[in-house]
Image: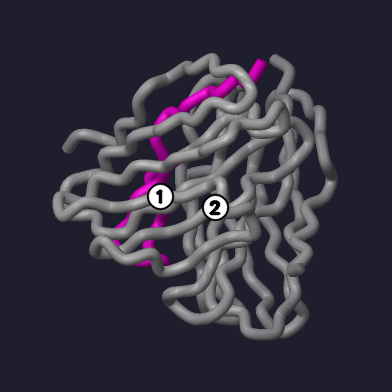
Amino acid sequence: ILNVEQSPQSLHVQEGDSTNFTCSFPSSNFYALHWYRWETAKSPEALFVMTLNGDEKKKGRISATLNTKEGYSYLYIKGSQPEDSATYLCAPLYGGSQGNLIFGKGTKLSVKP
Amino acid sequence: KAGVTQTPRYLIKTRGQQVTLSCSPISGHRSVSWYQQTPGQGLQFLFEYFSETQRNKGNFPGRFSGRQFSNSRSEMNVSTLELGDSALYLCASSLERVSPLHFGNGTRLTVT
Protein backbone atom coordinates (compact mmCIF):
# COMPACT_ATOMS: atom_id res chain seq x y z
CA ILE A 1 0.00 0.00 0.00
CA LEU A 2 1.48 3.36 -1.04
CA ASN A 3 1.87 5.82 1.82
CA VAL A 4 1.32 9.53 1.22
CA GLU A 5 2.31 11.71 4.17
CA GLN A 6 1.22 15.28 4.67
CA SER A 7 2.68 17.46 7.37
CA PRO A 8 1.79 19.09 9.56
CA GLN A 9 -1.65 17.60 10.21
CA SER A 10 -2.94 20.99 11.27
CA LEU A 11 -1.68 24.52 11.36
CA HIS A 12 -2.93 27.68 13.03
CA VAL A 13 -1.59 30.98 11.72
CA GLN A 14 -2.43 34.65 11.99
CA GLU A 15 -3.77 36.65 9.07
CA GLY A 16 -0.84 37.92 7.04
CA ASP A 17 1.52 35.06 7.95
CA SER A 18 3.07 33.05 5.17
CA THR A 19 3.02 29.32 5.58
CA ASN A 20 3.97 26.11 3.86
CA PHE A 21 3.21 22.42 4.13
CA THR A 22 4.70 19.23 2.79
CA CYS A 23 3.48 16.24 0.85
CA SER A 24 5.80 13.20 0.80
CA PHE A 25 5.19 10.23 -1.44
CA PRO A 26 6.98 7.22 -2.90
CA SER A 27 8.78 8.33 -6.04
CA SER A 28 8.76 4.97 -7.78
CA ASN A 29 6.30 4.80 -10.69
CA PHE A 30 5.19 8.37 -10.03
CA TYR A 31 3.23 10.03 -12.82
CA ALA A 32 1.68 13.28 -11.54
CA LEU A 33 0.74 15.15 -8.37
CA HIS A 34 -2.57 16.85 -7.63
CA TRP A 35 -3.24 19.47 -4.93
CA TYR A 36 -6.77 20.23 -3.73
CA ARG A 37 -8.30 22.67 -1.27
CA TRP A 38 -11.29 21.46 0.72
CA GLU A 39 -13.27 24.07 2.60
CA THR A 40 -15.80 23.03 5.22
CA ALA A 41 -19.25 22.31 3.80
CA LYS A 42 -17.93 22.48 0.25
CA SER A 43 -16.43 19.98 -2.16
CA PRO A 44 -12.69 19.67 -2.85
CA GLU A 45 -11.44 22.15 -5.41
CA ALA A 46 -8.42 21.55 -7.64
CA LEU A 47 -5.43 23.82 -7.16
CA PHE A 48 -2.65 22.31 -9.25
CA VAL A 49 -1.66 19.28 -11.29
CA MET A 50 2.09 18.89 -11.58
CA THR A 51 4.08 16.32 -13.50
CA LEU A 52 7.70 17.32 -14.05
CA ASN A 53 10.56 17.35 -11.57
CA GLY A 54 11.24 20.96 -10.64
CA ASP A 55 7.75 22.07 -11.66
CA GLU A 56 6.51 25.22 -9.98
CA LYS A 57 2.91 26.36 -10.21
CA LYS A 58 1.28 29.52 -8.92
CA LYS A 59 -2.32 30.61 -8.40
CA GLY A 60 -2.65 33.98 -6.74
CA ARG A 61 -0.98 33.80 -3.33
CA ILE A 62 -0.64 30.01 -3.47
CA SER A 63 2.26 28.25 -5.12
CA ALA A 64 3.63 24.71 -5.21
CA THR A 65 6.86 22.99 -6.10
CA LEU A 66 7.56 19.39 -7.01
CA ASN A 67 10.57 17.11 -6.54
CA THR A 68 9.84 13.78 -8.17
CA LYS A 69 13.28 12.27 -7.52
CA GLU A 70 13.02 12.51 -3.77
CA GLY A 71 9.23 12.31 -3.66
CA TYR A 72 7.96 15.51 -2.14
CA SER A 73 5.99 18.64 -2.93
CA TYR A 74 5.65 21.90 -1.01
CA LEU A 75 2.60 24.13 -0.97
CA TYR A 76 3.17 27.77 -0.01
CA ILE A 77 0.62 30.37 0.94
CA LYS A 78 1.85 33.95 1.04
CA GLY A 79 0.09 36.40 3.34
CA SER A 80 -2.58 33.98 4.60
CA GLN A 81 -6.16 35.25 4.74
CA PRO A 82 -9.10 33.84 6.73
CA GLU A 83 -10.63 32.60 3.47
CA ASP A 84 -7.57 30.34 3.04
CA SER A 85 -8.80 28.28 5.99
CA ALA A 86 -9.35 24.80 4.58
CA THR A 87 -7.86 21.34 4.41
CA TYR A 88 -5.22 21.01 1.72
CA LEU A 89 -4.93 17.59 0.12
CA CYS A 90 -2.21 16.21 -2.07
CA ALA A 91 -2.66 13.16 -4.27
CA PRO A 92 0.09 11.54 -6.32
CA LEU A 93 -0.91 9.57 -9.36
CA TYR A 94 0.80 6.28 -10.04
CA GLY A 95 0.68 3.76 -12.82
CA GLY A 96 0.56 6.09 -15.77
CA SER A 97 -2.27 8.26 -16.98
CA GLN A 98 -4.80 5.53 -16.18
CA GLY A 99 -3.55 4.84 -12.69
CA ASN A 100 -4.97 5.75 -9.29
CA LEU A 101 -4.78 8.91 -7.26
CA ILE A 102 -3.70 8.21 -3.70
CA PHE A 103 -4.85 10.98 -1.37
CA GLY A 104 -3.00 12.05 1.75
CA LYS A 105 -4.97 12.86 4.89
CA GLY A 106 -4.43 16.55 4.39
CA THR A 107 -3.17 19.56 6.27
CA LYS A 108 -5.89 21.55 8.01
CA LEU A 109 -5.09 25.26 7.94
CA SER A 110 -6.85 27.77 10.20
CA VAL A 111 -6.15 31.44 9.65
CA LYS A 112 -7.15 33.79 12.47
CA PRO A 113 -8.10 37.38 11.61
CA LYS B 1 -21.30 24.73 -17.24
CA ALA B 2 -23.11 22.68 -14.61
CA GLY B 3 -20.91 21.04 -12.00
CA VAL B 4 -20.89 17.47 -10.77
CA THR B 5 -24.23 16.54 -9.25
CA GLN B 6 -24.64 13.85 -6.64
CA THR B 7 -27.92 12.56 -5.32
CA PRO B 8 -29.15 12.14 -2.73
CA ARG B 9 -27.25 14.49 -0.39
CA TYR B 10 -28.17 12.56 2.73
CA LEU B 11 -29.25 9.00 3.30
CA ILE B 12 -30.06 6.96 6.38
CA LYS B 13 -30.17 3.19 6.05
CA THR B 14 -30.17 0.23 8.42
CA ARG B 15 -27.68 -2.61 8.50
CA GLY B 16 -28.27 -5.23 5.86
CA GLN B 17 -30.00 -2.90 3.44
CA GLN B 18 -28.57 -1.83 0.14
CA VAL B 19 -28.14 1.65 -1.28
CA THR B 20 -27.58 3.25 -4.67
CA LEU B 21 -25.89 6.62 -5.08
CA SER B 22 -25.97 8.62 -8.27
CA CYS B 23 -23.47 10.95 -9.92
CA SER B 24 -23.88 13.15 -12.99
CA PRO B 25 -20.52 14.39 -14.26
CA ILE B 26 -19.68 17.62 -15.99
CA SER B 27 -20.74 17.50 -19.61
CA GLY B 28 -17.93 16.09 -21.76
CA HIS B 29 -16.15 14.37 -18.88
CA ARG B 30 -15.90 10.64 -19.50
CA SER B 31 -14.00 9.67 -16.36
CA VAL B 32 -15.95 9.29 -13.13
CA SER B 33 -14.30 8.27 -9.86
CA TRP B 34 -15.79 7.46 -6.48
CA TYR B 35 -14.20 8.07 -3.09
CA GLN B 36 -15.11 7.30 0.49
CA GLN B 37 -14.20 9.56 3.37
CA THR B 38 -14.52 8.47 6.99
CA PRO B 39 -13.39 10.43 10.08
CA GLY B 40 -9.63 10.32 10.46
CA GLN B 41 -9.07 8.83 7.02
CA GLY B 42 -8.09 10.44 3.79
CA LEU B 43 -10.16 10.03 0.68
CA GLN B 44 -10.18 6.33 -0.11
CA PHE B 45 -10.45 5.41 -3.77
CA LEU B 46 -13.34 3.10 -4.61
CA PHE B 47 -13.34 2.81 -8.39
CA GLU B 48 -13.10 4.71 -11.62
CA TYR B 49 -15.16 4.38 -14.77
CA PHE B 50 -14.23 5.60 -18.19
CA SER B 51 -16.52 5.23 -21.19
CA GLU B 52 -18.73 2.72 -19.34
CA THR B 53 -15.78 0.49 -18.37
CA GLN B 54 -14.33 0.10 -14.90
CA ARG B 55 -10.75 1.16 -15.35
CA ASN B 56 -9.51 0.91 -11.77
CA LYS B 57 -10.75 -0.48 -8.49
CA GLY B 58 -9.68 0.29 -4.97
CA ASN B 59 -9.30 -2.08 -2.05
CA PHE B 60 -12.94 -2.43 -1.06
CA PRO B 61 -15.05 -5.56 -0.65
CA GLY B 62 -17.27 -6.82 -3.44
CA ARG B 63 -20.30 -5.31 -1.68
CA PHE B 64 -19.25 -2.06 -3.30
CA SER B 65 -19.98 -1.93 -7.00
CA GLY B 66 -20.63 0.64 -9.64
CA ARG B 67 -21.48 1.25 -13.21
CA GLN B 68 -21.42 3.98 -15.79
CA PHE B 69 -24.03 4.66 -18.43
CA SER B 70 -23.57 5.79 -22.01
CA ASN B 71 -24.26 9.40 -20.99
CA SER B 72 -21.36 9.12 -18.46
CA ARG B 73 -23.68 9.23 -15.46
CA SER B 74 -22.53 6.79 -12.82
CA GLU B 75 -24.10 4.89 -9.97
CA MET B 76 -22.51 3.29 -6.97
CA ASN B 77 -24.19 0.46 -5.10
CA VAL B 78 -23.44 -0.88 -1.65
CA SER B 79 -25.15 -4.09 -0.65
CA THR B 80 -25.58 -5.60 2.80
CA LEU B 81 -24.74 -2.34 4.54
CA GLU B 82 -22.53 -2.40 7.63
CA LEU B 83 -22.15 0.27 10.31
CA GLY B 84 -18.63 0.95 9.02
CA ASP B 85 -20.03 2.01 5.66
CA SER B 86 -21.23 5.25 7.24
CA ALA B 87 -19.23 7.87 5.41
CA LEU B 88 -19.21 10.72 2.96
CA TYR B 89 -19.14 9.39 -0.59
CA LEU B 90 -17.71 11.73 -3.17
CA CYS B 91 -17.90 11.45 -6.90
CA ALA B 92 -15.50 13.28 -9.19
CA SER B 93 -15.32 13.68 -12.92
CA SER B 94 -12.46 14.63 -15.19
CA LEU B 95 -11.43 14.67 -18.81
CA GLU B 96 -8.51 12.38 -18.06
CA ARG B 97 -6.70 11.22 -14.94
CA VAL B 98 -3.98 13.84 -15.26
CA SER B 99 -6.68 16.48 -15.55
CA PRO B 100 -7.95 18.02 -12.31
CA LEU B 101 -10.85 16.24 -10.66
CA HIS B 102 -14.13 18.10 -10.27
CA PHE B 103 -15.93 16.89 -7.18
CA GLY B 104 -19.60 16.78 -6.36
CA ASN B 105 -20.95 17.81 -2.98
CA GLY B 106 -21.10 14.22 -1.84
CA THR B 107 -23.67 11.89 -0.34
CA ARG B 108 -23.57 11.53 3.43
CA LEU B 109 -24.59 7.94 4.23
CA THR B 110 -25.48 6.94 7.77
CA VAL B 111 -25.99 3.27 8.56
CA THR B 112 -27.81 2.51 11.82
Amino acid marked by disc 1: Gly
Disc number placed over residue B9 in the picture, else none: none
Residue at 72% over, 40% down:
A18
Q: Nearer the viewer, mark 1 or mark 2?
A: 1
Query: What residue did someone put label 2 on?
Result: B46
Query: Secondary structure under badge 1?
Result: strand
Image quadrant in which you'd find residue A23: bottom right
Q: Quadrant of the N terminus of chain B?
A: top left
Query: What residue did someone put label 1 on?
Result: B66
Query: Secondary structure under badge 2?
Result: strand
| Mark 1 vs 2: CB contact within 8 A | yes
Q: Judge whether A70 appears above or below A103 on screen.
A: below
The CA span between labels 1 and 2 is 9 Å
Residue B107 lies left or right of residue B102; in this view the side is: right
Residue at 66% over, 50% down:
A76
Report x, y in % for residue A108: 73, 34
Residue at 78% over, 53% down:
A6
Chain of residue at mark 2: B
